[in-house]
Image (cartoon, rainbow, N blue to C red):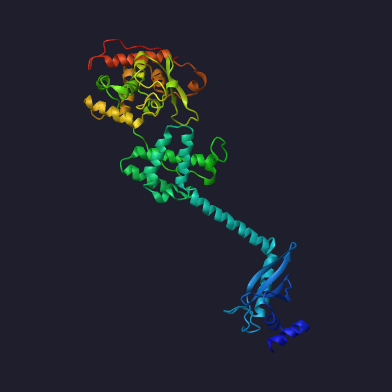
Amino acid sequence: MREDSVTDTVTANPRLLTAGQRIAALELGRSIVLEKIPMGGSLEARRLPAGTAQFYWRFTQAGKTTRVPIGAYDSGAPPKSLKPSGRGYSVAAAVEAARELAKLNAETPGGLVAKREREDQERRKQDELTRARATNTLRALCDEYVAWLAAQNKVSAAGAKNVFHNHLYTAHPGLASKAAVEVEKREIVVVLRTLVEAGKATTARKLRSYLRAAYACALKADSDARLPSGFIPFMVVSNPVEATAPIPSRAEKNPLPLIDLQRYWRELRKKEGSIGAALRLHVAMGGQRPAQLVRLRSADVSAFSVRLMDAKGRRAEPREHLLPKTDVIARELRQLPKDGFVLSTDGGTTPMHPTSLTAWAAEVARAAGLQGFQLKRVRSGIETALAEAGVSLHVRGLLQSHGIGGVQERHYDAHEYMAEKRDALDLLIRTLNRSIGARTSHPRVALKEVK
């Protein structure tokens, strides 16, 4: 039959034509219903712009009509074949496929439309997770943690930033770029072991501590309003660092002996300028931590006291640490800037850096003939010298701002112990000014004990 005669017959009485003839007569963009499906819906054929015919199962559910593609019409397929050929479907095969779809729709909770919506939602969720993993990496978590420390003016912010950069980002870029939520315990251990085996156990301890704290913040951010919301997108559900074994630290009881302290102090007294004054101030104030000392501002100095801010540890706010303004401290302060930062080489605009203090102190120590000098040994040497002179453990702790985190000190004891601190600092200077190597001739000083 010619195509024009088929079209005429369709217009006159389409029921007289076979399904194949009706499909052949379809115009571009037009559809026809070929057969009703017993379990719901119907089989449709549609002429596509490319000229081929496509089968659909059409159904209406919850007031919404949906067409589910079945496949292309294969006019050369055996009319009674129920399986698709390499080119497409016969009408009988398309009817069978529509029946299977109708059955599946009836058996699926909510129908195929609801199933597709659930699948689309899950796919969108997975896409979001994929994007989040690409963005919320271990490096991003560490950067967020450093930013949080800096926002709280924590002295550890710079240290954490350097440790992360040198021993994680640069040394292990693959792990740093991995999604924070996917990092495993064994991967953390590999990083820490690399440092330990290189003889850098202290650095390994610091890195473990910083990583552990960063994950702890991400873990608690959705329930702790004190933490910034920037931790929440990391979607951390566990802390992989928590499961790693702590790296034990060896107690470094290596204080600078009194005789070396005296040599160091004698050489310091020859040092001129702001650097000499800064290093002498460090000793005269009892060996305070350089990181805290360099943040001293002129506004923190009064007629009778000097105020440092102790931001060390986990406290949310820095703790005020008051020291008496002894005659020696006052003398050194007069040689330092009166505005801005007290320990400064540019008139108070910018502070000295702790590492600079350490380097300058090492130069003085070399000039004094000291071996194995470290600035931290000055701090422990001062405490040891004061202990030998009879200063109580409690007063030494108050003077150097350590070991005072107990309940009594935090909540009940508001006394500043300025007289006790002054006595200890004056005793320190007298001890340092004695003849080098001379044994003490004064009795042990029994400073006031705290009851």
Badge count: 0
Point out residue 62 in the picture as x, y percentages from the top left corner.
74, 61
Point out residue 138 in the picture as x, y percentages from the top left corner.
46, 46
Q: Eyeballing the image, is 73 above or below 201?
A: below
Q: Is 296 situated left or right of 381 in this image?
A: right
Q: Eyeballing the image, is 305 above or below 217?
A: above
Residue 381 falls in image quadrant: top left
- Residue closest to the far left: 369
Q: Quadrant of the N terminus?
A: bottom right
Point out residue 369 in the picture as x, y percentages from the top left corner.
21, 26
Name the residue: 75% across, 62% down: 63
Q: Quadrant of the C terminus?
A: top left
Q: Is 103 situated left or right of 435 in this image?
A: right
Q: Is residue 87 at all visible to an observer of this figure? A: yes
- Residue closest to the far top: 442
Point out residue 283 in the picture as x, y percentages from the top left corner.
33, 21
Q: Is residue 186 at all visible to an observer of this figure? A: no
Residue 27 falls in image quadrant: bottom right
Q: Eyeballing the image, is 218 above or below 404?
A: below
Q: Nearer the viewer, residue 400 or 364?
A: 364
Q: Is 68 situated left or right of 389 in this image?
A: right
- Residue closest to the far right: 12
Name the residue: 30% across, 25% down: 255
